[in-house]
Amino acid sequence: MLRILLVEQDIGFAFDLSTRNYVLSQGKLIAEGTPKELLADATIRKTYLGL
């Protein structure tokens, strides 16, 4: 399995490349999951993804 740390502002690009994602805020893990799981969370979508 290949693992890469990608720090990216373009969420569409990051989600296209990854199968699992982590949302960090001030150095703390806020959420983790697949792109679909993260997009389903209204708080994550609005606060951290700007969608």
Image (spheres, rainbow, N blue to C red):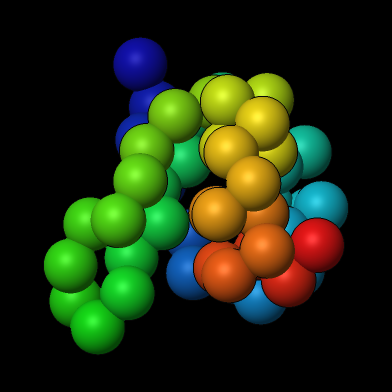
Residue 15 percent location from the top left of the image:
70, 42
- Location of residue 16 with respect to 37 vertically, above or below: below
**Along the line of sight, the residue nearer the viewer: 2 or 25:** 25
Residue at image location 37% in from the left, 38% down from the top: 32
Q: Is residue 46 above or below residue 27?
A: above
Residue at 32%, 74% in the rendered image: 25
Residue 17 occupies quadrant: top right
Where on the picture, by quarter, is residue 43? bottom right
Residue farthest to the left, as pictured: 28
Residue 26 percent across, percent down from the top left: 24, 83
**Residue 35 point in image, percent of width and height:** 64, 33
Give the percent coordinates (x, y) of residue 41.
Answer: 58, 38
Question: Residue sitting at 77 percent across and 38 percent down?
Answer: 16
Can the viewer see residue 9? yes
Residue shown at the point (35%, 16%) measured from the top left: 1
Horizontal arrangement in the rendering, residue 48 relative to residue 40 (left or right): left
